[in-house]
Amino acid sequence: MTIEKLTLKIAKAEGAPCACGSCGDSFQKTALERALMRLTGISKANFDTIGGKVKIEYDTEKVNPPKINERLEKLGYRIENTGGVS
Amino acid sequence: MKEYIRGTVLLVLGVISTVASWFILQTSIAYASVTGIALALAAVACGYTIYVTALRLLFRKRITVQLFVTVAIAASIAAGYYIPAATVVLIILAGTTLEDYVFYRTRGSIEKLVNISPKTALVRRDGTEVEVTVEDVKLGEIVLVKPGDKIPVDGTVISGYSAVNQAAITGESMPAEKAKGDQVFAGTMNGNGALEIKTEKIAEDTTIAHIIHLVEEAEEKRAPIQNIADRFTTYFLPFILILASAVFAATYFLVGLQPAITRTVSILLVACPCALGVAVPVAVVGAIGNASMNGIIIKGGTNIEKVKDVTLVAIDKTGTLTIGEPEVVEIKTLHSFSESELVKYAAIAEKFSEHPISKAVTAKATELGVSVPDPTEFKIAPGRGVEAYYGKQQILIGKGMADTAFTEEEGKVISAFESEGKTVLPVILDKQVIGIIAVADTVRKDSSEAVQRLRRLGIKTVMITGDNMRAAKSIAGQIGVDEFYAELLPEQKVEIIGKMKKGNVVAMVGDGVNDAPALANADVGFAMGAAGSDVAIETADVALLGDDLTKVEYTIRLSRKAFSKMKMNIAFSMAWNALGLTLASLGFLVPILAAVLQEAGCISVVINSALLLLYK
């Protein structure tokens, strides 16, 4: 089991509930984090809604960045850079 | 940590220090004022996420509500209102914590789906049984499921018999009987029998995992009504800034500095478009979550808006309104033969035929408890019937097999059955007609209930089918649909849907595979019995995982309710904000009251939307 870290920059969330960046944030934050954590092999996910960054820890044997990107895009998030290992 | 737990901890700390601060400031002990102020400031510090967020977003050139709150708090502290500042922070903290909790619960419907999938499976390897995690089960491996356990993989039963409760997936509470050759799904609950299952799909490829992902995606998809809220919030904040400055200037010159500060702070605190911003997404998640717990997948907020407008429901007949498999529906015995004798002879002849009609006859024999010996000889006459021998006795089945004309009595029975759209099977034993069995596709027991419920919502129902006119007419009459079209080719179904769309919002209900083109052409496509078919789940706008047709009406009612909540919430938030801002500008609000008003507005909207989860 090899754990890697990955940071993705998210351009704009299609489903961002609140234009003012206010209380709806936690609604979206938990949704994204939980959706990622449900993917087999992802052990940690942290979405910083203000900076638009998602930090992910994953098991390289079970999941890979393209699969994570695909999941994010299906959830309505556009990824700005595919991100490197940080 | 869960957001609402962190919020609760901060809230408790804040309340303790504020109360302590207030007591200490009342006393005359040494350093009372310094200690009191320090405690109040500590309480203010509990709202640190607000300030941090405000500054981070300001740094990104975005002015937000958090900034208003930060400025308001800073102004109150500067003016020496320590305890009011702390109180305002605590009210906001209490509000957001409660909201976070409601958000958490609203999202919880997916969690319920997730928790139903077991984590381990009992697998037969090298002759022994080993327990492994579900991800490590290999395709084709035999999984053993004990009575009362959850089924860990998707697959086919290879041995055993049990009643499996599939409510987790289909929303249907009646257990489904599973025997050799039947498909079972991960996450469903095994009944009293042990099952051996050949693994076909594991972990993320299982139907339940697929459903979870679809629900997640659906919940994040925007509803068009959201745009109204967004447009409003874009102009809202600049407007608040202008209003706050104007009120400050006017009050300062007309009344004085003190009221000017109070009014401005109140305006900044009462102004929050967040009720507006969360009203729609929470309602969408609430409605989709509710649906998913009932075995319905609504693919996103857009479909909620489309479904609510449906005025006509077109329903495919075979497999949707009916079960889709022929059954023996009527038996007429002749020449003093008993019903079970008749069925016994018919079943002997049909025993080795794979034709659906033959299966209907053998199923009837099983139902009557008649034991069926093997025929001595057996031959199928394609399109006409069956010829078989049992010992020396000759058994002929089928209208086309009779070599002499039917008597008047026999003819009457045959034409009566046929006029009802049934397939007729005369059973001829040694040249004598001993009885007539009628076979037909049977109507699902909830079909007519489903149609009636739709009618109560003011929705027109139309049955469409490729079947012949006679059978269609009989079934349409039994169910009570408003109109029906028969003898349609698949492309004609698409055409008819197109015609019905003029002047109607059309929903089409079908199995999602054979009817895929018609489903796609309708305004909303409902796929029924979609649990076993990824294609059906994928192509439909709304997938009904079970076979319960009444869920169509439920989906329409739920969507109407959800949409009316969205509209109500948007209207309420706008009115609430307008009221708060007016009161604050005129000096009728103190900052604490402003914060209470704002949070109360937000929470009522969030809870109102979240209540959709409980809608029935």
Image (cartoon, coloured by chain):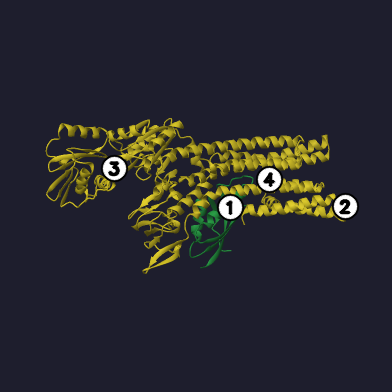
Chain colours: A green, B yellow
Residue type at tag 2:
Ser
Q: Residue at x 30, y 35 (%)?
A: B472
Residues B524 and B473: in front is B473
For the residues marked 1 and 3, what is the alpha-carbon distance in whole angstroms? 51 Å
Q: Secondary structure at mark 2?
A: loop
The image position of residue B432, as x and y in percent, is 13, 40
Query: Which of the numbered marks, if any, corresponds to residue B28?
Result: 2
Q: Tell us which disc is closer to us: 4 or 3.
A: 3
Residue under label 4: B65
CA neighbours of label 1 inside 10 A, class few (<14), some (14 to 19), many (20+): many
Q: Secondary structure at mark 4?
A: helix
Query: Which of the numbered marks, if any, corresponds to residue A30?
Result: 1
Q: Are marks 4 and 3 on the same chain?
A: yes
Q: Secondary structure at mark 3?
A: strand
Above or below: residue B9 compared with residue B473: below
Subunit bearing disc 4 = B
Residue type at tag 1:
Thr
Q: Tell us which disc is closer to us: 4 or 2.
A: 2
The image position of residue B226, as x and y in percent, is 57, 41
Q: Residue at x 81, y 48 (%)?
A: B78
